[in-house]
Amino acid sequence: MNLETQKYGDVIIVRLCEGRLDAALSVRFKEGMREIVDAGATDIVLDLGEVAFMDSSGLGAVVSVMKHIGREKTFRIAALTPAVDKVFKLTRMDSVFKILSSPNDAIDQALKATG
């Protein structure tokens, strides 16, 4: 499981550097994301720009991460590929998650919020 992180002020961009998020990777993905969240991250953006395939296990892992993060922290998803975007829309998870077109959108929003 390859998760890369970059910090921009209070925003942590977590890039999933895998072509798939499926049953084979979902447990390791959840563990990696929990480590990042438990290390004190409060504004997390999950960059899925490299993920070309996601199955229900992968989607369930993303939901599990959102639940672990809780309401007191910010969690957004960015850069969905067409196939992954379709999964979010078919399951109506696009109405549950805040989805950004790119991780830079989150950075721009954070910079505007801080003035």
Image (tube, rainbow, N blue to C red):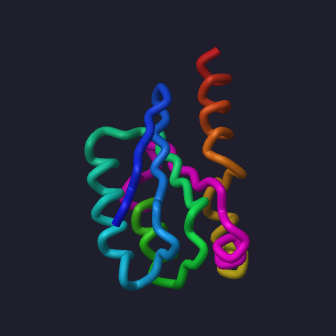
Q: Residue furthest top?
A: 115
Tell me if residue 12 is in the magenta stretch.
no
Left/right placement of residue 35 relative to residue 62 reads: left
Q: Position of residue 90 (x, y in %)?
A: 71, 81
Give the residue displayed 40% in from the left and 85% down from the top. 23
> Would you place residue 69 above or below residue 9 in this image?
below
Quarter that holds the N terminus:
bottom left
Residue at horizontal 37 percent and vertical 40 percent from the top: 41
Give the magenta range: 67-87
Q: Nearer the viewer, residue 59 or 5?
A: 5
- Asked if residue 80 lies left or right of residue 8, the reply is right
As rendered, which of 63 and 10 lies closer to the eye?
Answer: 10
- Please state, as top left, top right, bottom left or bottom right, where the C terminus lies in the image: top right
71 in the magenta segment: yes
Q: Is residue 110 left or right of residue 38?
A: right
Q: Residue at x 62, y 39 (%)?
A: 106
The image shows a total of numbered marks equal to: 0
Residue 25 drawn at (x, y percent): 37, 76
Q: Residue at x 30, y 56 (%)?
A: 34
Q: Based on the displayed image, in which of its 4 quarters is residue 61 positioned?
A: bottom left
Q: Nearer the viewer, residue 38 or 104?
A: 104
**Looking at the picture, how far across and down is residue 80, in whole percent?**
66, 63
